[in-house]
Amino acid sequence: MLGAVTVLAGFAATAHADVVGDAKAGQGKVAMCIGCHGIPDYRTAYPEVYHVPILGGQNAQYIQNALHGYKKGDRHFETMHAIATTLTEQDIADIAAYYASQTATSKNNPEK
């Protein structure tokens, strides 16, 4: 029984590594992100004053790690935790791919 638990734990830890992000699919999944992350120099005041970063051009692995951290509760910001818990592994990969594909000069990029 212990062997099966170990195998399942190992699978769960690496399951998201096999998911490939699709930037085009990610574009359709960022509507809830742009309300905060799409506003230059935006700061939120709840639960504390927090500078909200622009995500366009950020490294995909960084975005994935951040979303997984919020989802697991390792990163602490209630709004992001609530959003991240609704995302599938595919959603996280797609959103990360979308934002990683952005640059300052990207055309049709209202959702940086």
Image (spheres, rainbow, N blue to C red):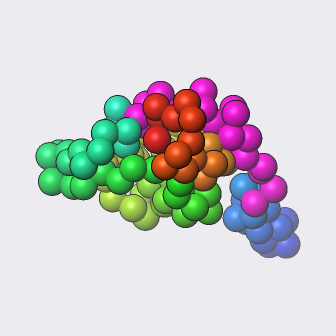
Quarter of the picture holding the N terminus: bottom right
Q: Is residue 12 above or below residue 41?
A: below
The location of residue 31, given as percent across then percent down, is 47, 28
Tell me the residue at 22%/55% (across/down).
50
Viewer-side residue, 98 vs 4: 98
The residue stretch that appears in magenta: 17-34
The reply, left or right, for residue 22 in relation to residue 57 is right
Q: In which quarter of the image is residue 46?
A: top left
Tell me the residue at 44%/54% (across/down).
70
The reply, left or right, for residue 65 in relation to residue 55 is right
Tell me the residue at 52%/35% (across/down).
109
Q: Quadrant of residue 61?
A: bottom right
The reply to whether the magenta stretch includes residue 91 is no
Tell me the residue at 57%/35% (across/down).
107
The location of residue 21, given as percent across then percent down, is 73, 46
Viewer-side residue, 108 vs 61: 108
The reply, left or right, for residue 72 in relation to residue 24 is left
The reply, left or right, for residue 87 in relation to residue 46 is right
The location of residue 39, given as percent across then percent down, is 31, 39
The reply to whether the magenta stretch includes residue 31 is yes
Q: Is residue 89 visible?
A: no
Viewer-side residue, 40 vs 49: 40
Q: In this view, does 86 lie above or below 69?
A: above
Q: Can residue 77 be seen in this view?
A: yes
The prevailing secondary structure element of the residues shown in magenta is: helix
Viewer-side residue, 86 vs 19: 19
